[in-house]
Image (cartoon, rainbow, N blue to C red):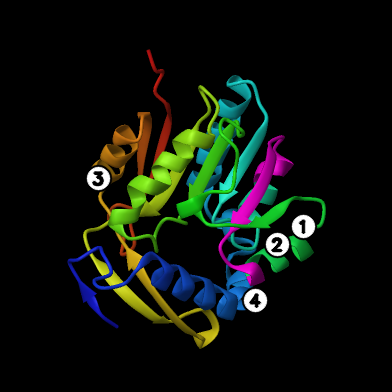
Amino acid sequence: MLEDGNTSDPGRSTDDWLADTRTSYDTVAASYADFVRDSLVKEPYLRAVLALFTDLVHAAGGGPVADLGCGPGHVTAHLQAHGVEAFGMDLSPAMVDIARQDHPGLRFEVGSMTDLPLADCSVAGLLAFWSLIHIPDDAIPTVFDHFRRVLRPGGPVLIGFHVGAQSRLKTEGYGGLPMKVYVHRRQPEQMATWLRDAGFTVDAQMLLDPDGSSPGAVLIAHPTTRN
């Protein structure tokens, strides 16, 4: 595996890395779903963050909430079970098929965060739970511009991600199956800056397992009021 300090994919177009990501997760969809299906049971801090997010959605007036990069839909279902009108979207059609099978009463769609197929001001909250990790640095501003566009005034956005300063090429995934995706680790300060540049106010930041081998972070923000 390649690991270096560069968080971009040199020489690769948006179509290239999107196609690689889609193909990789189509390949590992079933084994990945098995891996994460009960993962929240063992994550009390993440459950607490999701409970806070749920409260913020209700405080902002409620309404549909988009779980972007939803994978097999386990987080979407968790939100729905806690009173949020959640729906999921993922780049991988195979992931969306599994999400629909596992959670037949919920809405799941195929779509990309880089060209988000949602109407302006159409969602009351937005979640990207470790689903930005394969998006290169130069595409993050576009993604956050879409988040800002589709969120209603006051609606919360919750971003979860790996913390670090390196990228690595992941060539083998869940179940030992082949993948070709860069995994980008980022500093909270950089993510917060991108959010602010896209028109968000950052409300909270939490570090997860900061002394462990795979630290993470969560940021909560809302659209900055425009004068």
The kind of residue on which mark 4 rests is: Ala
Tell whether label 2 touches label 4 (CB within 8 Å). Answer: no
Residue receiving disc 2: 99
- The numbered dot on residue 30 is 4
The kind of residue on which mark 2 rests is: Ala
Dividing the picture into quarters, in which one does residue 132 lie? bottom left
Residue receiving disc 1: 103
Asked whether residue 156 is in view, the answer is yes
Tell whether label 1 touches label 2 (CB within 8 Å). Answer: yes
Q: Looking at the image, is mark 4 or mark 2 earlier in the sequence?
A: 4
Tell me the SS state at disc 3.
helix
Q: Which residues are magenta?
A: 79-94
The kind of residue on which mark 1 rests is: His
Q: Is residue 222 above or below residue 140?
A: above
* Residue name at image x 43 percent, y 68 percent: 15
Tell me the SS state at disc 1.
loop
Q: How many marks?
A: 4
Magenta segment: does it hold 80?
yes
